[in-house]
Image (spheres, rainbow, N blue to C red):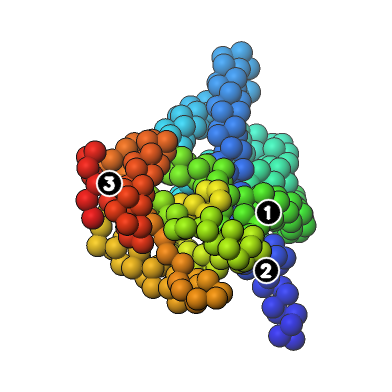
Amino acid sequence: MKKLWDWVKNVWVYSGLSKENYENIQQSVAHKNARLLKNAIRSFEVLTGVLLIAVFFFSQLNALKSFLILTFIGMMMMEIIVRVCDLNNFRTLRSVCYVFLSIVYLFAAVSGTVGSPKQSAILYFILLFVGPLLFIDKPYRMSLFLCIMTVIFRSFALHYKEPEIANFDVLNAIIYTMLAILLYLLTSRTKADEHRLRWEIAKQRDTDELTKLLTKNAIERKIKRYMELTPSKPAMMLVIDLDNFKHINDTFGHAYGDAVLRLMGECIRSNFREDDYKGRFGGDEFVVFLPGIDDKQQVVTYVNNLVEMMKAHVRTPESANPVHGSIGIALYPKHASTYEELFKKADEALYASKERGKDRYTFYISKEVLK
């Protein structure tokens, strides 16, 4: 019984995926939902605009005139909301999607009851199947939404339609809602699997095979996106370079050099936060980007912990001497407002560390480098 309950819970909450896999695809799903939302809003604006124009030529639509105006205004407000809200926030995007769906379903419910009291609400029944397919979300939330909308439709139908037509429409609405929920359970699993596959391909493409950190292109893309979305939010960039790595390769061989890089990747992954961007820039050079941090002392703590970890785990085989690294640090947006400039400042600070004897960190400050 417990296994059955776990399976049902998994299907209703995570579309049949594991919790970890579902969380992994959230970013991919959010991007698709955001695109669909913008397209759907514009399409619905055009639809309501055309219907408003049609009101002047078809008297049958007069009953919907006020509601069409309100709906058109609602779509214009949705345009503003989409531009103002941070759609990169999962909760915000989800809320905006459900607000949009609510407006659309209310439009269909009113047009199928108040607007045509003597006809069946075909538009609402069609929307029961089409609407949920527009967005991807946890099945239980979409199912609850559909049930709430159908309860509202029932109230309108019983109040405005003739009893015979109302009872017929309410029965159809209940049946179609149940079928729509079943269809959503099936399609959400397929879509979730599709996004999981895309995420795994993207992860493989963006992950450095040796160190399991981000590749140069991936970390550059992520940092640029951070700067684009949060131009005033602080961050820090660390450029890390292993000292005398060429000597290690030449003395102990490339296989051991690869082992050192692999251990370095482990140190970086475990030392910094999960949300920090950690990548191998190339060769023995690494880049770490710390979003939301402008406290130098906090960064110094991270750096000191990394140095201690390197001393404990990254060593040469014969002398057992620890492998050291030099670090350059630059602040965003204080030192630079673009990725290229920020990297340049951090790189200058790195080379200042090298010139001062290696095995140290250096902050870049206004053309001068101070420790």
Earlier sequence position, callout 3 versus callout 2: 2
Q: CA distance from mark 2 to mark 1?
A: 19 Å
Task: Determine which of the numbered discs, if any, sits on residue 364 in the image.
Answer: 3
The reply to whether the C-beta atoms of the residues labelled 3 and 2 are less than 8 Å apart is: no
Residue at the location (66% across, 57% down)? Answer: 209
Earlier sequence position, callout 1 versus callout 3: 1
Q: In front: 161, or 266?
A: 266
Q: Secondary structure at mark 2?
A: loop
Task: Determine which of the numbered discs, if any, sits on residue 18 in the image.
Answer: 2
From this view, report whether residue 20 is shown above or below residue 276: below
Count of labels in the image: 3
Q: Is residue 301 left or right of residue 176?
A: left
Q: Quadrant of the C terminus?
A: bottom left
Residue at the location (56% across, 57% down)? Answer: 213
From this view, report whether residue 92 is shown above or below residue 84: below
> Residue 182: horizontal and vertical position, in percent?
76, 59
The reply to whether the C-beta atoms of the residues labelled 1 and 3 are less than 8 Å apart is: no
Q: Quadrant of residue 276?
A: bottom left
Q: Nearer the viewer, mark 3 or mark 2?
A: 3
Q: Secondary structure at mark 1?
A: helix
Q: Nearer the viewer, mark 2 or mark 1?
A: 1
Q: Where does label 1 land, which residue?
A: 204
Q: Amino acid at mark 2?
A: Ser
> Residue 338: horizontal and vertical position, in percent?
38, 35
Task: Determine which of the numbered discs, if any, sits on residue 143 in the image.
Answer: none
> Residue 203: horizontal and vertical position, in percent?
64, 54
Q: CA distance from mark 1 to mark 3?
A: 34 Å
Q: Amino acid at mark 3?
A: Tyr
Q: In front: 318, or 172?
A: 318
